[in-house]
Image (tube, rainbow, N blue to C red):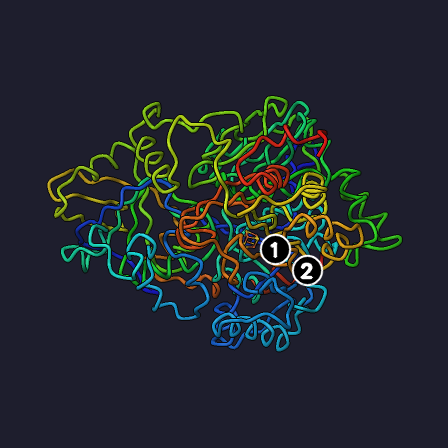
């Protein structure tokens, strides 16, 4: 897993509340086993017109947005299904950070397994980011748990110690679980 | 384990009994008793095991079915696309290689994963149950702690039978009163979705409690727990009682003989102790509910059948104005109008929310002796092969077919529209499934979520109808 330290990027704003996993990656694309290929289907229903051409109004299709790595969304990002295809598609497109006021539980857990940093901010800070110039840079630093707009005070965001370790060190969670082999065996004997 | 004198909630009891290890500043290592798998979210997990040279730790605690991609036409008639076929074949191969019991498509034992778990008696009180599927919450109806996981976690459970979990908060939903005619479990859960919103229980495990819950059958309790995820909850639970035990007794995987008696004794302990506290409480009086329908693009956008579609002008915040405007635009609906009378192209009775016997009986009770309205297509898809047989033994298939509905093979079908059963862009459906997200039932699909009764009322009238006007009247 790609580890995360700091990142500078301009924002892509997708200010819709309750963006569900069916919007992030519609079910018809779940039949693939190719994670990287999912990037082209990210937000497919919004990103492409009926005839398959790109919808020029949609943020991800605008030339200026290419290469940006931070998505600013509305509230409650990632609600709905448990499909890990959602963080796979976001990562495959190039996103490393999603900013919202809240995230759905399963999406949060899936994001962490794929090196995608979720930055949860207050309503006020969210507003500040919403109205920021569309070309403003943000600087994100995991070690200090801060996000900073070029000319603004840094905003602190919450992240638990374990998630931070997973992201910063690229900790292998399955490896960590396997280290409990003996405890698991003892538990099973006691059942 | 906690001190016996400290009152505990149902969730706390099940959680505490499954913590294998806990390091400081780390999530708990939680033991998983039952792992359900299906074809869509498991292949990458098995691939990860292969890459690492790992085995499935407890194939005996893993159960597999095929449901998301399977056509609902009889197997010999069905046509599958290559990628769907590939995923189904992959599951079959993986199960064979690792010695996992599979209930394959067309075998007469298959069904939607959340329907067959309980039906087999594999779902039991006090168990921890996971599946790479968010509607795993369904199994909480038996007093299990059941929740959806991602594919990486499917790999974790296959390899270690454990998961890393932060302990969630608890939310008590107290349901009081008696539902009126035409109002059932689906209306109760859609009522809760409308009341607290789709993020209303994020980070929490719900326990549904109160007189209105105790009165429900297992089929109804499963409908309610199933949609816990639609308010963002990690899981939804109901304490087991005599109704639960009666349902489980004699099921193939349920304990037998002396073990059964001992199990019931243990299960009886699985209730929230007097004096135990929850992080939050929500009350809902079910006597005040009418048949519910969603009008928008998430399950929280629901109203009673006699109400008008909300007007964005009346919304309390600017983001609510935007969300409502966007939803009504997508749905092609006008604000402040009633939903009743809205023409319907397709009716879908099925999904892990509403495809069990009671759901089918409800739908049949309205369709019996009536005809599907001209221009409306009706699909009835039983949740499992066993339910299909039981429904046929009762003659429900004839009621549906005589009315002009299609009686299909079991599977997820139009709930997720991955198997070919899909709405066309712009079509309107009344659906007994659980999600009305944009494009959920096919690209451009427009979904009204409702109960089997309300769906059947739409089937025979071709429009959204208050089912209460059809109940107990001459046909
Ligand atoms: S019926 Fe629908 S919600 Fe249930 S498991 Fe299948 S796709 Fe998921």
Residue B98 or B78: which is nearer the viewer? B78
- What residue lies at 61% left-to-right and 37% top-to-bottom? B457
User: How far apart are the alpha carbons under marks 1 and 2?
Assistant: 9 Å
Mark 2 burial class by Cα count in 10 Å: few <14, some 14-19, many 20+: few
- Visible in this render: residue A162? no
Q: Circle 1 sits in a helix, a strand or a loop, which is it?
A: strand
- Give the secondary structure at mark 2: helix
In the rendered view of the protein, which quadrant contains the N terminus of chain A?
Answer: bottom left
In this rendering, position of residue B281 left or right of residue B10: left
Tell me the quarter of the image containing the C terminus of chain A. bottom right
Query: Can residue B318 be seen?
Result: yes
Query: Residue B411 — which label?
Result: none
In the drawing, does residue B163 fall left or right of residue B355? left
Dot 2: chain letter: A
Marks 1 & 2, CB-CB < 8 Å contact: yes
Q: Is residue B348 left or right of residue B267?
A: left
Figure label count: 2
Query: Is label 1 or label 2 in front?
Result: 1
**Residue A57 percent coordinates (x, y):** 20, 50
Q: Where residue A153 appears, x then y in whole percent?
A: 16, 37
Q: Is B83 in front, or is B52?
A: B83
Which residue reaches farthest front?
A: B374
Residue for badge 2 = A188
Q: Position of residue B82 (x, y in %)?
A: 48, 74
Which chain letter matches label 1?
B
Q: Is residue B17 above or below residue B315?
A: below
On screen, residue B87 above or below B390: below
According to the picture, the residue beneath numbered tag 1 turns out to be B31
Query: Taking B256 as reference, is A63 left or right?
Result: left
Tags 1 and 2 on a common chain = no
Which quadrant would residue B273 be assigned to in this image?
top right
User: Which residue does the image show at 49% across and 38% down from the upper left?
Assistant: B231
């Amino acid at each position: 897993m790609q580890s995360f330290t700091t990142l500078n990027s301009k924002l892509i704003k997708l200010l819709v509340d309750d963006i569900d996993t069916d919007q992030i990656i519609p079910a018809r694309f779940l039949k693939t086993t190719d994670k990287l290929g999912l990037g082209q289907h990210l937000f497919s229903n919004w990103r492409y017109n009926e005839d398959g051409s790109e919808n020029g109004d949609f943020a991800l299709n605008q030339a200026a947005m290419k290469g940006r790595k931070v998505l600013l969304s509305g509230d409650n990002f990632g609600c709905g299904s448990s499909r890990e295809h959602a963080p796979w598609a976001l990562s495959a497109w190039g996103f490393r950070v999603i900013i919202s006021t809240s995230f759905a539980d399963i999406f949060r857990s899936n994001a962490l397994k794929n090196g995608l940093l979720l930055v949860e901010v207050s309503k006020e800070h969210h507003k500040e980011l919403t109205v920021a110039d569309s070309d403003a840079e943000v600087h994100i630093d995991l070690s200090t748990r801060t996000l900073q707009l070029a000319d603004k005070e840094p905003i602190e965001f919450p992240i638990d110690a374990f998630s931070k370790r997973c992201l910063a060190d690229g900790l292998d969670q399955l490896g960590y679980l396997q280290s409990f082999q003996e405890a698991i065996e003892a538990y099973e004997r006691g059942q | 384990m906690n001190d016996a004198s400290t009152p505990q909630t149902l969730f706390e009891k099940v959680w505490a009994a499954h913590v294998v290890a806990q390091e400081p500043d780390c999530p708990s290592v939680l033991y998983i008793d039952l792992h359900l798998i299906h074809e869509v979210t498991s292949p990458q997990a098995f691939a990860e095991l292969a890459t690492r040279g790992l085995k499935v730790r407890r194939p005996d605690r893993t159960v597999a079915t095929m449901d998301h991609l399977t056509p609902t036409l009889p197997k010999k008639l069905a046509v599958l696309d290559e990628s769907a076929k590939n995923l189904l074949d992959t599951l079959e191969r993986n199960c064979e290689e690792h010695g996992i019991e599979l209930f394959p498509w067309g075998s007469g034992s298959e069904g939607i994963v959340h329907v067959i778990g309980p039906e087999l008696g594999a779902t039991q009180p006090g168990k921890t149950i996971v599946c790479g599927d968010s509607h795993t919450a369904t199994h909480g109806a038996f007093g299990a702690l059941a929740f959806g996981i991602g594919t990486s976690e499917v790999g974790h459970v296959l390899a270690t039978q454990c998961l890393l979990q932060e302990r969630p908060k608890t939310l008590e939903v107290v349901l009081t009163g008696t539902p009126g005619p035409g109002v059932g479990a689906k209306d109760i859960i859609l009522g809760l979705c409308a009341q607290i919103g789709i993020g209303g229980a994020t980070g929490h495990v719900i326990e549904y409690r109160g007189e209105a819950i105790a009165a429900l059958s297992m089929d109804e309790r499963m409908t309610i727990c199933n949609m816990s995820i639609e308010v963002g909850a990690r899981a939804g639970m109901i304490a087991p009682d005599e109704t639960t035990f009666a349902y489980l007794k004699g099921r193939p995987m349920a304990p037998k003989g002396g073990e059964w008696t001992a199990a019931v004794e243990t299960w009886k302990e699985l209730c929230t102790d007097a004096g135990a506290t929850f992080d939050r409480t929500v009350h809902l009086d079910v006597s005040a509910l009418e048949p519910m329908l969603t009008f928008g693009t998430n399950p929280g956008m629901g109203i009673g059948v006699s109400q008008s579609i909300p007007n964005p002008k009346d919304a309390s915040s600017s983001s609510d104005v935007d969300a409502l405007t966007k939803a009504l635009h997508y749905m092609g609906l006008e604000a402040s109008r009633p939903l009743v009378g809205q023409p319907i192209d397709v009716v879908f009775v099925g999904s892990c929310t509403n495809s069990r016997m009671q759901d089918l009986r409800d739908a049949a009770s309205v369709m019996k002796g009536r005809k599907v309205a001209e221009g409306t297509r009706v699909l009835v898809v039983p949740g499992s092969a066993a339910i299909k047989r039981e429904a046929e033994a009762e003659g429900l298939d004839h009621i549906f077919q005589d009315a002009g509905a299609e009686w299909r093979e079991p599977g997820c079908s139009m709930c997720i529209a991955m198997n070919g059963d899909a709405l066309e862009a712009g079509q309107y459906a009344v659906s007994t499934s659980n999600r009305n997200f944009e494009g959920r039932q096919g690209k451009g699909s427009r979904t009204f979520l409702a109960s089997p009764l309300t769906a059947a009322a739409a089937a025979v009238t071709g429009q959204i109808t208050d089912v209460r006007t059809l109940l107990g009247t001459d046909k």
